[in-house]
Image (cartoon, rainbow, N blue to C red):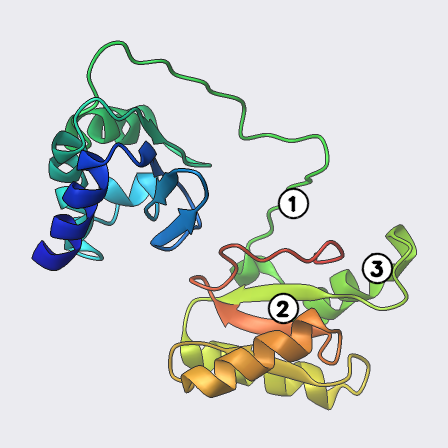
Amino acid sequence: MKGFLSIIKKVHQRKLINYLIIDEGKHWILIWEIKFEFYSFVAHCVSQWGHDYRPDYLKLGTLHDELNNVPCIAVTATASQQVIDDIYSLLHLHQPVLEFKSSVFRSNLFYDIQYKELLDDPLINLCEFIDEIPKQTNMKSPSGIIYCRTRDSCSDLANKLSQTGKYGTVKAYHAGLTNEKRTQIQHDWMNDSISMICATISFGMGIDKGDVR
């Protein structure tokens, strides 16, 4: 926005901006220290979602141009080569460009894929999976996020899991709830008042809960 750009230009004129960091999982914040460190939101959104989800992401290259001589760093956990190329282009990253990459596969993660359509009873299969978690870990009870495609399926699955009586209260979390309701559900889950959340896939960004499965 023009007003925000005006502020940033004045700060830059006073040589108070260290870096332009386009990071994953941080909202727009300004950190007051000896100098500013200036954060935006999600690097891969510039390419994958910027055109329709957050069109303003496409203006970050212009912001980079305004902050001439300020180093720019783009950080993301996931990016195909096409996305990387888009990030370079749309953020106006010029030489010298340093690229640091590591594998998406981590030793502490395990992937198991099953096709729901091929299961005799997906709910029973899911419950069996949940029941195995305490046996495989030191957790007394499971703590998890179950992702669903739609809001209705979140609510339906949360009700069914609650009705089993084995997992305490399971709540649905999706955009159809009020901000206050979502905040309360997330707070209760983070504090183990709720064991599991059935959520649409937008939930989970920036969640820091060590026992989540």
**Above or below for 37 versus 121:** above
Residue 65 or 31: which is nearer the viewer? Answer: 31
Whether label 2 touches label 3, CB < 8 Å: no
Answer yes or no: is residue 193 visible: yes
Viewer-proximal residue, 18 or 64?
A: 18
Q: Which residue is mark 1?
A: 112
Give the residue at x 57% y 83%.
184
Classify residue 75 as left or right of residue 139: left
Q: Is residue 193 left or right of residue 56?
A: right
Residue at the spot of label 3: 132
Is residue 47 visible from the viewing direction of this image?
no
Looking at numbered disc 3 in the image, what kind of residue is underneath it?
Glu
Q: Are marks 1 and 2 in contact (CB under 8 Å)?
A: no
Q: Secondary structure at mark 2?
A: helix
**Residue name at image x 52 percent, y 79 percent:** 183
Image location of residue 115, percent across then percent down: 55, 54
The amino acid on which the numbered mark 1 sits, given as a three-letter code, is Asp
The quarter of the displayed image where residue 209 is located: bottom right
Q: Secondary structure at mark 3?
A: helix
* Residue 125 image offset from top left, x and y in percent: 70, 65
Q: CA distance from mark 1 to mark 3?
A: 14 Å
Residue 203 location (% of width, % of height): 48, 64
Q: Residue 78: x percent and y percent?
A: 43, 36
Towards the viewer: 161 or 171: 171
Identify the residue under disc 2: 122
Question: Gap in Å between the C-alphas at discs 1 and 2?
Answer: 15 Å
In which quadrant of the rendered image does the N terminus lie? bottom left
Marks 1,3: beta carbons within 8 A? no
Looking at the picture, does residue 56 appear above or below residue 150? above
